[in-house]
Amino acid sequence: MIDAETLIDEIVHGGSVSSQEGNARAWPAIETWLADGEIFLRQARVSAPHRRPALPVTAPARSLTTGRPAHRSH
């Protein structure tokens, strides 16, 4: 049996896998995803970077007049 990475590489790079053979090789991976997909998604959510809450701004906002004048379109 071929692993998923090899199958994808053959498909993407034009390997000599026939459609029927490719389907036969892909079915075990598809069945695994269908059977265990919830576990895979849970693991992906846990390992994905989480958004941090925005930190409060410590410096007061500067007025536009203290720096460069704002660009004005005509």
Image (cartoon, rainbow, N blue to C red):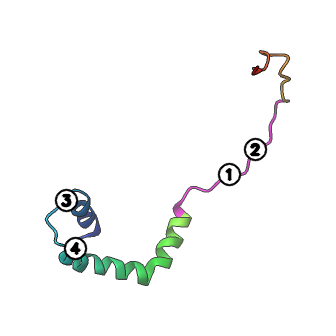
Q: From this viewpoint, is residue 1 visible?
A: no
Whether the residues at callouts 4 and 1 have beta carbons within 8 Å, the answer is: no
Label whose residue precedes the other's in the sequence (4 or 2): 4
Q: From this viewpoint, is residue 26 visible?
A: yes
- Mark nearest the camera among 2 and 3 is 3
Label whose residue precedes the other's in the sequence (3 or 1): 3
Residue at numbered disc 4: 22
Q: Secondary structure at mark 4?
A: helix
How far apart marks 3 and 4 lie (CA) works out to 12 Å
Label whose residue precedes the other's in the sequence (3 or 4): 3
How far apart marks 2 and 3 lie (CA) works out to 49 Å
Quadrant position of residue 56 = top right
Q: How far across and down, in percent of the image, does residue 10 sit?
A: 21, 62
The residue lying toward the viewer, choosing from 70 and 65, is: 70
On residue 14, the disc is: 3
On residue 55, the disc is: 2
